[in-house]
Image: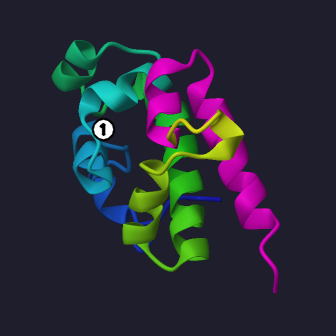
Amino acid sequence: MALSALAPLGTVLTDLGRVDIKRLSAELDLPVPALAPALGRSSRWINEHPTAASFQPAALELVDAINALARSLGGMKFARAWLKTPNPQFAQRTPADVLRFETNGRSAVVGLIRGIVTHQPD
């Protein structure tokens, strides 16, 4: 999937087409420290460089997955709620907590989202 300005999270894109993590944080209602580990950086570093090229592939993967989830669930408010709801796939931890505290949190959350999106009944 390619991110576009028309996608649910299209507002997180800069004029150069990069994901701005501060904007993403605001859109998801998650603090930058919750997203930083999923991007392999400290929250301090991301606050200083919110659109750095070094984490764009990881940021785009996460944004694309959340866009797909939002479309599947009926909107961003439902995707935000999903991120903050305990999930049995994560031993009743929230996907937001997995992003923040697990070494491979981004991969785990993106993988679960892909499973949800691709297994939706028609």
Relative to 38, is 106 on the left or the right? Answer: right
- Residue at 38 percent of width and 50 percent of height: 17
Which residue in the structure is indicated by mark 1? Answer: 21
Residue 39 in view (yes/no): no
Q: Main secondary structure of the magenta part?
A: helix
- Residue at 30 percent of width and 38 percent of height: 21
Residue 116 is one of the magenta-drawn residues: yes
Relative to 44, is 90 on the left or the right? Answer: right
- Residue at 72 percent of width and 43 percent of height: 111
What quarter of the picture does the N terminus occupy?
bottom right
Mark 1 element type: helix
- Residue at 26 percent of width and 50 percent of height: 29
Q: Is residue 21 above or below residue 66?
A: above
Residue 100 in view (yes/no): yes
- Please state the horizontal and vertical placement of residue 51, each as a whole percent of the image: 30, 33
Q: Is residue 33 above or below residue 118?
A: above
- Please state the horizontal and vertical placement of residue 122, each as a whole percent of the image: 81, 86
